[in-house]
Image (spheres, coloured by chain):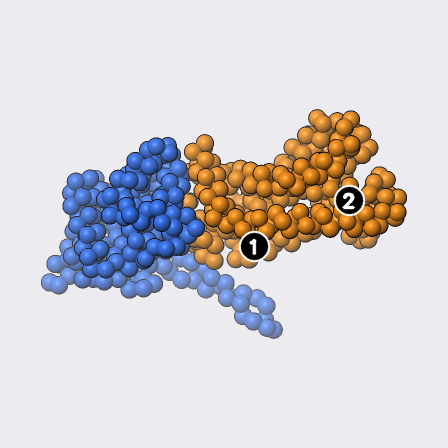
Chain colours: A blue, B orange
């Protein structure tokens, strides 16, 4: 079976130092298990949802796959490449949408921001402009592209983040709460975009996170629920209700 | 590599254009500082010109002017480099940059190139003014020796810059440390205050600072008309400093970046 994303007992533990305070100056180490032995297999062209409440480990799981955070234990492969050994190949294969709207330069326009990130992906200026125009048209943000990022509404910021995510034409999309900050019409548009264009036409693999089971149920071919870093369910949306 | 560097230069230039007023203010403050020194130096001309400034009978203004021209290309680049990394982290863009295939080395180098260009272009009017005042001293000086000292100093300061950048990556207030080192180098490193004027205990610290040797060699060439052969002790000191700091900086930077990734704090501030 050709898997786009494959994890085996993937774990991440954070160690925090806690000051004990005067007169004791030593530090107490505390451990937090963010992702606990997660084993998932996501097929090529699949639309997979990861659902869980806040602080359940969804974002950390995506960051592990995006090579931004190294795992404490276990293995993970994206597009067949190990996230610990082939980081460059993994980064070439993915597009990451973070739920952080801070990850753009507020003083620059949307276009200037995208040109910068396209440069980091080895685009020439000409190719970058062409690609940005295509993506702006796809995401219906043409008229906002030459406005400064700080003037954008939350919804437009989210769409610009998706445009950045699609810049390098990645095979695997890791989307952290893609529907966040979107109104009903915007969310509906993106659902259609993800399903019909990116999955059916372009054969991309999408792993997205959400804290809403209902939302994930509508979108995903398969989904998993995560709580305190542990996968509690994995299957088709209908299976859970059974 | 070219495209990453070009992307960083263009992006930072556009940010610079959007904050023209702030940068103009910085330039104005630097110029004001220079003018104040010039006026003060004139007021104390009788005493200042006869002061024996680290072996040369020059005015305090000429002393500090050489310090400024030296520090602009070494110290300012170092500070700007670390501040730029700190800014990327603060803005939350560092993580978005690092998720791209371009490796950390390329990204760091691109930030460094921008820092150099920014300092070079930004301080150009001040430097032209300083060169004008130092014109007589420049005539007849060994220009090759001057360039050599600059390159060696740049190498030493780049190593130090990488070391400081490591702290900026892991500590939330790492830029405070950068400013502290910056002031130490300016005050104790022979840029603003002659080494011979420093209290004896503080001179011990000066021996561990690259600017002490770099700026001293710079003044030796300008005012003592020394050649490369005459500044060998300073060259050796700068080489030794680079030989120690560079490997240390590479190890520390790799370690701190690994730690920052492990802790997931690259975008946290």
Give the residue at x 34% y 63%: A55
Q: Give the number of callouts.
A: 2
Height in image: B220 above or below A189? Answer: above
Task: Categorize mark 2 by other alpha carbons within 10 Å: few (<14), some (14-19), many (20+).
Answer: many
Which residue is label 2 attached to? B61
Please tell me if label 2 and label 1 are on a single chain: yes
Give the residue at x 48% y 39%: B9
Report whether B32 appears left or right of A178. Answer: right
Q: Position of residue B108 (x, y in %)?
A: 50, 41
Q: Nearer the viewer, residue B64 or B35?
A: B35
Q: Position of residue B167 (x, y in %)?
A: 56, 51
Residues at discs 2 and 1 in contact (Cβ within 8 Å): no
Q: Nearer the viewer, residue A21 or A112?
A: A112
Q: Position of residue B210 (x, y in %)?
A: 70, 41
Q: Nearer the viewer, residue B12 or B129?
A: B129
Q: Position of residue B266 (x, y in %)?
A: 45, 52
Height in image: B6 above or below B37? Answer: above
Which residue is label 1 attached to? B174
Note whether residue B211 is visible.
no
Q: Residue furthest bottom?
A: A23
The disc numbered 2 marks a residue on which chain? B
Q: Nearer the viewer, mark 2 or mark 1?
A: 2
Give the residue at x 65% y 32%: B151
* Of pointers 2 and 1, the one earlier in the residue sequence: 2
Note whether residue A166 is visible.
yes
Task: Categorize mark 1 by other alpha carbons within 10 Å: few (<14), some (14-19), many (20+).
Answer: some
Q: Secondary structure at mark 2?
A: helix
Report whether B269 appears left or right of A115. Answer: right
Give the residue at x 70% y 33%: B149
């Amino acid at each position: 079976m050709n898997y786009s994303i494959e994890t085996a007992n993937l774990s991440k533990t954070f160690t925090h130092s806690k000051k004990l305070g005067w007169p004791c100056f030593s530090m107490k180490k505390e451990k937090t298990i963010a992702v606990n032995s997660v084993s998932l297999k996501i097929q090529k062209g699949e639309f997979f949802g990861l659902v869980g409440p806040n602080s359940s480990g969804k974002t950390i799981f995506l960051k592990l796959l995006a090579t931004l955070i190294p795992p404490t234990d276990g293995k993970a492969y994206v597009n067949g490449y190990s996230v610990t050994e082939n980081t460059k190949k993994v980064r070439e294969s993915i597009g990451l949408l973070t739920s952080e709207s801070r990850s753009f330069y507020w003083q620059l326009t949307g276009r200037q921001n995208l040109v910068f990130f396209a440069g980091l992906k080895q685009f020439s200026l000409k190719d970058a402009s062409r690609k940005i125009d295509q993506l702006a048209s796809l995401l219906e943000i043409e008229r906002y592209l030459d406005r400064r990022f700080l003037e954008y509404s939350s919804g437009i910021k989210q769409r610009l983040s998706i445009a950045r995510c699609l810049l390098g034409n990645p095979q695997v999309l890791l989307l952290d709460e893609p529907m966040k900050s979107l109104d009903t019409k915007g969310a509906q548009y993106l659902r259609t975009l993800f399903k019909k264009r990116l999955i059916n036409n372009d054969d991309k693999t999408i792993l997205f996170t959400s804290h809403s089971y209902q939302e994930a149920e509508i979108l995903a071919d398969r989904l998993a629920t995560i709580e305190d870093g542990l996968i509690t369910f994995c299957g088709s949306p209908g299976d859970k209700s059974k | 590599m070219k495209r990453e560097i070009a992307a960083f230069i263009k992006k930072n230039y556009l940010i610079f254009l959007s904050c023209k007023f702030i940068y103009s203010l910085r330039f104005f403050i630097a110029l004001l500082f220079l003018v104040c020194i010039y006026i003060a130096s004139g007021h104390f001309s009788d005493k200042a010109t006869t002061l024996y400034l680290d072996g040369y009978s020059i005015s305090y203004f000429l002393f500090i002017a050489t310090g400024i021209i030296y520090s602009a290309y070494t110290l300012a680049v170092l500070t700007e480099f670390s501040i730029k990394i700190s800014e990327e982290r603060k803005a939350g863009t560092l993580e978005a940059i690092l998720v791209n295939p371009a490796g950390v080395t390329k990204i760091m180098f691109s930030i460094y190139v921008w820092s150099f260009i920014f300092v070079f272009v930004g301080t150009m009017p001040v430097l032209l003014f300083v060169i004008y005042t130092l014109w007589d001293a420049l005539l007849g000086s060994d220009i090759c020796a001057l360039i050599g000292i600059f390159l060696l100093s740049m190498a030493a300061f780049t190593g130090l810059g990488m070391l400081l950048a490591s702290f900026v990556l892991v500590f939330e207030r790492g830029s405070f440390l950068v400013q502290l080192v910056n002031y130490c180098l300016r005050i104790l490193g022979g840029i603003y205050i002659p080494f011979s004027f420093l209290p004896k205990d503080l001179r011990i610290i000066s021996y561990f600072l690259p600017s002490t040797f770099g700026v001293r060699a710079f003044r030796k060439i300008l005012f003592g008309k020394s050649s490369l052969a005459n500044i060998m002790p300073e060259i050796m000191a700068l080489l030794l400093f680079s030989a120690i700091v560079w490997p240390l900086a590479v190890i520390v930077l790799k370690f701190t970046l690994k730690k920052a990734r492990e802790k997931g704090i690259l975008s946290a501030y």
